Amino acid sequence: MNLQQANGKVPIPSCDFDRPILLIPFPTREQFNSLYGKRTDIDKKWIVLTARAQGCTLLAAGASYGLSRERVRQIEEKFIRLMSEYWQRKPS
């Protein structure tokens, strides 16, 4: 499952057999910044990922930065992995 299919939520793999994927809210900009730390390309990733969460295709999401569909898919895959790690270590 990807951001486009999850209708603006982030699909996180779960250990629960009944609910193998949890859909959590897309992070705020502050949460997103803390997730990625100090990076120079963080604005580009934010724009690409929010476009995907709003339903844009891989091609449309990367068009403004000249990114290929594959690169957008890779950015999205890493984001979902980072969110999954964050969610698992998040205090309850």
Image (spheres, rainbow, N blue to C red):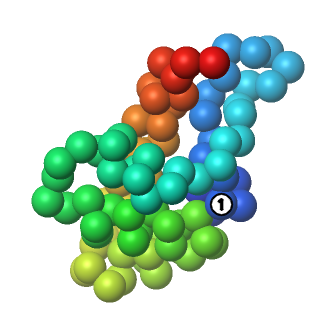
Task: Quadrant for the C terminus, please.
Answer: top right
The 10 Å Cα crowd at callout 1, few under 14, some 14 to 19, many 20 or more, is: many
User: Residue 25 vs residue 65: left or right?
Assistant: right
Determine the residue located farthest toward the bottom in the rendered image.
64
| Badge 1 element | loop
For the question of whether residue 5 can be seen, the reply is: no
Q: Measured from the top left, where is residue 66 in percent x and y?
A: 25, 80
Residue 62 sits above or below residue 83 on the image: below
Residue 33 to residue 21: above or below: below
The residue that appears at 71% across and 41% down in the rendered structure is 23
In the image, is residue 89 above or below residue 34? above
Q: Is residue 69 left or right of residue 57?
A: left
Residue found at x 58% / y 53%: 26
The front one of 63 and 25 is: 25
Is 43 left or right of 14, judged from the image as shown? Answer: left
Under mark 1, the amino acid is: Gly
| Residue 37 position (above or below residue 28) | above
Residue 49 picture location, percent across and down: 45, 63
Image x and y of residue 55, in percent: 63, 72
Residue under the image location 60 percent in, 47 percent down:
10
Residue at 46% of width from left, 29% of height from top? 86
Q: Residue beneath label 1, please?
A: 8
Asked if one can make out residue 28 in the rendered structure from this viewpoint, the answer is yes
